[in-house]
Amino acid sequence: MSVQDAIMSSRLNKKKAFLFVLIVFFVDQLTKFLAVKFLYPDKIIEILPFLNFVYVENKGSAFGMFKFLGSEFFIIVSIIVIAVLVFLCFKDYPNWFVYSLIISGALGNAIDRLIYGYVIDFIDLHAGSFHWPAFNIADTAISIGIVLFLYKSLRK
């Protein structure tokens, strides 16, 4: 493979990662928009016996923890995480998918915090009266990305 072919391949790979981030980010923002439009403030839509759509304003991190740190803290952390992962995505391209999942999720939740001051969650998984904390598409992308990262790291 020539140097020119390698450069062209690298550019295409970066475009693929960027496009994937945009798609996941768009789906996240679209579903949050729909949650605001159809679920705000307290409507519950039962989808399956274990799945509801609800509207939740999450001012903390995962599971609503650390609310006292404020949106500014989470925005700064998100920017740092996104910057590091973009760098890793370019440096460690074989793992672009893992990094892109986490980047798109962090970006989606950071945009919510910038616009609203909180993250919009709407997916409610439950078993009987036990409800997992509500989450969104961005949270799902981050979680899948982290699980894949750990799996790949432990497999080495």
Image (spheres, rainbow, N blue to C red):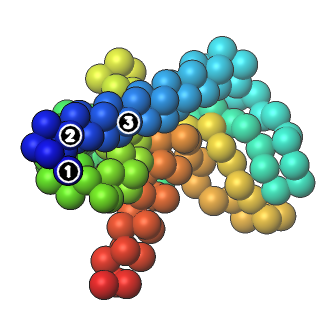
* Few, some or many residues within 10 Å of mark 1 (<14, 14–19, 20+): few
* Few, some or many residues within 10 Å of mark 3 (<14, 14–19, 20+): some
**Alpha-carbon span between mark 2 and mark 3:** 16 Å
Residue at point 34%, 26% (across, down): 111
Q: Is residue 112 shown left or right of residue 41?
A: left
Point out the residue furthest to the top here: 37
- The residue singled out by tag 2 in the image is 5
Residue at point 82%, 34% (across, down): 45
| Marks 1 and 2 in Cβ contact (< 8 Å) | yes
Give the secondary structure at mark 1: loop
Give the secondary structure at mark 2: helix
Disc 3 residue type (three-letter): Lys
Between 153 and 42, the residue placed more toward the observer is 153
Q: Sequence order check: which comes first, mark 1 or mark 3? A: 1
Disc 2 residue type (three-letter): Asp
Q: Is residue 84 shown left or right of residue 50?
A: left
Q: Is residue 126 shown left or right of residue 77?
A: right
Residue 57 seen: no
| Marks 2 and 3 in Cβ contact (< 8 Å) | no
- The residue singled out by tag 3 in the image is 16
Point out the residue furthest to the right here: 49
Residue at point 78%, 34% (across, down): 44
Residue 91: image x %, image y %? Answer: 15, 53
Q: Sequence order check: which comes first, mark 2 or mark 3? A: 2
- Image quarter of residue 50: bottom right
- The residue singled out by tag 1 in the image is 1
Residue 115: image x %, image y %? Answer: 35, 18
| Marks 1 and 3 in Cβ contact (< 8 Å) | no
